Amino acid sequence: MEELAKHSPRWWDSGYADHNVSCMGGPSPEIFEIAPALRAESVIVELGCGEGRNALYLAQFGHQIFATDISEAAISKLKRLASHLGVNITSGVAAVEDFQPPAYLDVFIAHSVLHFTERTVWKPLVTALIDRTQPGGFHCFTNTLERPDHPIPKEGLAAGHKKSFARGELEAIYAEAGWEILRSDYYIKWDSHPGIPIHSHCLEKVVVRRPIGAEDLPPMRAEPIKAAGMIPPKQFDTLKLGTPRDAIIEMFGSPPASHGVATTRKTVGGNNQEAIADGYMREDMIYGDHGLQFVDGMLTGKYRYFTPPKRLSIREA
Ligand SMILES: C[S@@+](CC[C@H](N)C(=O)[O-])C[C@H]1O[C@@H](n2cnc3c(N)ncnc32)[C@H](O)[C@@H]1O
């Protein structure tokens, strides 16, 4: 598989071609977070959906999902996984550049894809989607950004990264439109995927919501995840993925709180090893400005935050 990744301009191709692994891991945490606040039978659009980790999770709640990706291997894997999980997703091979937004929608997801398009593509698309999103609907973005101290990695450039986002640009568009900015996190993440050992990128994660208006939908709030003391930078740099959670607590102590999500249904596997998991536990622990992500008690990702890491939950009355 490493051979394949070496020869492919897109590092995810080998992971999509292998139906036994999960190339991108389980659903992204903000997808778990917004799921309880969605209107029944929401219309959900995901572009650049890859093998479908987010779409497949949300489909289990009976929403109407439309998911596309430019990669045939991704969509063929998504279809297989959907059939295995017994969920319905309308999916197809398509480029973001050719996407025609539906008349209305509740959720738009673009996870690590829009930076492969020019600003002249994503900006008019976002404007159209803002107009067509129902009250209480969400838009969720994750984009890789260039920083002077953290250039776009070579595998990102080889895959066609366009450097078309500046930090804060999305947030400004949504603030101007009067939407609620729930999360706007800025960080560097180190993780690994089948076919690509450890790599790192600087990311922006933006979750925004159209005001609920008179709708009977639950309001949400973002709270910082409580942090423990520091991990000395040298120790952070050498911390190996796969380290057990207990060993980390022994080294750095136990943070006052963690943010955990336990999947109780079958879903895309969380640790990049298995395509489908019967259920797994994902946990994020924060030490100073460092974050550690665990799946079933093993370290699967490391973060360095420039903004306080947050979690979203339903705001009780
Ligand atoms: C880093 S992967 C993320 C996949 C998925 N969103 C996830 O988070 O698991 C980037 C995805 O964007 C897709 N992609 C890249 N350029 C695209 C484009 N112009 N139109 C549609 N999909 C694109 C790739 O095929 C790939 O599946």
Image: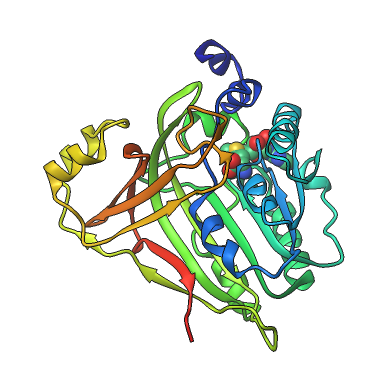
Looking at the figure, which quarter contains the N terminus?
top right
Which residue does the image show at 34% across and 64% down from the upper left? Answer: 308
* Residue 16 sits above or below residue 120 on the image: above
Residue 9 lies in quadrant: top right
Q: As displayed, is residue 185 above or below residue 66?
A: below
Ligand 1 is found in which quarter of the picture? top right
Q: How many marks?
A: 0
Is 138 displayed left or right of 187 in the figure?
Answer: right
Residue 156 in percent (x, y) is at 54, 34
Q: Is residue 245 visible?
A: yes
Q: Is residue 288 left or right of residue 158?
A: left
Question: How did the renderer colour the structure?
Answer: rainbow
Left or right? Give the position of 113 relative to 302. right
Q: Residue furthest top?
A: 3
Where's residue 10, x and y in %?
61, 27
Quarter of the rendering containing residue 223:
bottom left
Identified at 33% across, 55% down, the residue is: 305
Res. 161 visible in picture: no
Q: Quadrant of residue 213?
A: bottom right
Q: Nearer the viewer, residue 116 or 211?
A: 211
